[in-house]
Every structure is written in C-alpha cells, then in structure tokens.
Image (cartoon, grey):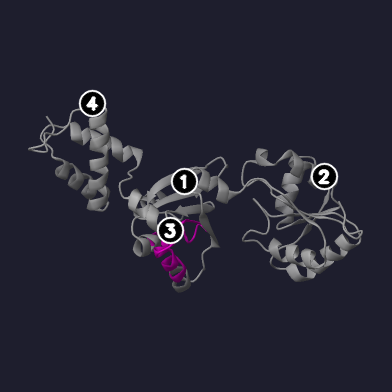
Amino acid sequence: MESRGFGTLYVVATPIGNLEDLTFRALRILKDVSLIAAESVSHTRALCRHYAIETKVTRYNQHNEKAKGNELISRLKSGEAVALVTDAGTPAISDPGAFLVGLALKEEIIVTPIPGASAVMAALSVCGLPTETFVFMGFLPNRAGRRRKVLELLTTEKRAAVFFEAPHRIKETLRELGEVLGDRTVLLAREITKVFEEIRRGPASKLMSHLGPDRPRGEFTLVVAGADQAIDSESHIESDLQKKIKTLFKKKGMTLVEVARKVSEEERLPYRRVYRACLALRAAMEGKGAETPSAASGRWN
C-alpha cells in the first residue's frame, strides 16, 4: 500500500511479556519491512531472534526522536516500509512513537496499525468494574505534588481510570490513592502475561500490604474504580475475606456487628465497608437457605 510513491509506516504491537502474544500479521510485517524502528535495539533483536526475523533494527526513542524521526521520514518518502515498535505493547501510547506518527501524517505518509497485546486492555478485561467507558492516564507525574494533583482530578471522575506505574513509585502511589480517593476498589496487575504475573484486587491500603517491605519489582498497571463505582465497591470484599466472614457468621453467639468489627480490626479495613459486605453476604446466605441470625437478636443459631 503506497501513497505518492511513499512507503508505509506500520505501528506494530509486540508482546507485553509472553512472546506467544505476537500476532501472525505482526510477524509477517516485521519480516517484510525494510527497517524496524525500535525503542530498544537489544530488546527487539531478542524478539527477532526468537522468530527468525532478519530485518535490520535501528534505535528510535525519546533520546533521538527528532533526528532519527527525520531520517525515518526520508526513508519512508523514498519508498521504504518501516515498522515502529516499542519494548512492549502498542507504540505511540505513552510512548515517543507518537512523534514519528505525527511527522508521517504531516507528510501524507500512510500509517497502518498492526494491533496486538495491550496492558491497558488486558488489565481492564479482568478488573471486574464497569468498562463501557474509561480514562487512560499513562504514567503519573514523577513529582509527588503534581502526582497528587492528578489523583485529585479523579475524585469526581465517574469512569474507571487506568495508568501505569514504575516499581520504585508503586507504594507511594498506592498510599496517595488511599489518602485522596479513599478505599476504592483497585486492580493491581504486575508483570502481565509474564512468568510471575500477579493480579490482585482490593482497596489501595490492602494492596500495599501485599507488596511487602522490600522494593517491588516488575511493571505495574492499575485500574481504579470511578466515583460512581466506588459506592458499589464498598460492599465488595476479596474472596478470602468472604470465607472468613462466613466462618465467623457460623460461630454461635456472634452478631453481625461483632463479626464486622472483628474483621475490620484484624484486616485494618474501614468498618462501614466491612459492615456492608457482611450485610450483602448474609443476604446471599439467606437466599441459599443457610443458617441465619434471628430477627430479634441478630445472632446466629
């Protein structure tokens, strides 16, 4: 496909972890183009070796985007086809590839997407929150003050918010999420599709405890419930805590209030949130014919 004798710029999505997530079409394009413009030459060459791709790879990233961008445009205008890739996922999304795409469009060069793996879509697909609409925020600012201001924008945002975070900032970000937005439901995805993939859901304060005392490793994707969704999430408790609540319910002599207070204190969760979860679980158990507390005493018999 050509325009005015120009070559085509292919924006090619590459695996975000598991190498098997490269599409057949992406594999063909990477083999057929004249040049691959990559964020990291060594990283992309490893992918090429795995699939026996012999196409030449050149470095294109935030450090040389202007000079290299003009060079790549010249090659495209001479009729060569170029594939743009990033280290993981889709180029031009929170990525310097957007600059090259802009240059190509100004020169009326055809830009063709080759879709594939996306950490954003992967995280949204398993978050359990309404995803008819959402807002993608990329990486949060490095500076604490600016980062907090961005998070404050989410206090009234009704859509789920998705963003990336680096391992050295993830604990601080979770802490600020809790302070600014309260204990909304958060999905924390680490190393998506990789060997040590980890996906957890819960309030920010709870997720912090799962990270442990040492500096976390890996790349993180976060999905945060929107303002409207936060109301529903107050009654959501992770499955392991649901089992704990049900076990306490079945102990003779414990009222719903006592169960909620005990779980709230032991798990360091807001009492109101646990109480609502207890109400929801009790209603579900009653519907299944389980033992229920008497209306007068609220105790389990």
Q: Quick check: marks 1 and 2 in contact, CB under 8 Å?
A: no
Of residues 281 and 74, the one drawn nearer to the viewer in this rendering: 281
Q: Quick check: marks 2 and 3 in contact, CB under 8 Å?
A: no
Q: Quadrant of the C terminus?
A: top left
Magenta residues, start to end: 149-175
Residue 268: % across, % down: 26, 51
Label 3: which secondary element: loop
Q: Horizontal placement of 55 versus 243: left or right?
A: right
* C-alpha span from label 1 to label 2: 35 Å
Check disc 2 and report the residue beneath it. 31
Check disc 4 and report the residue beneath it. 289
Can you see residue 49? no
**Residue 154 located within the stretch drawn in magenta:** yes
Residue 123: % across, % down: 52, 47
Can you see residue 52? yes
Type of residue at label 2? Lys
Task: Decide which of tag 1 and tag 4 comes sooner along the chain.
Answer: 1
Tell me the residue at 78%/64% (across/down): 105
Check disc 3 and report the residue beneath it. 158
* C-alpha span from label 1 to label 3: 16 Å
Tell me the residue at 61%/48% (across/down): 118
- 63 up-or-down from 5: above or below: below
- 300 up-or-down from 82: above or below: above
Label 1: which secondary element: loop
Check disc 1 and report the residue beneath it. 127
Which callout, 1 or 3, points to the residue nearer the camera? 3
| The furthest residue to the left | 296
| The furthest residue to the bottom | 145
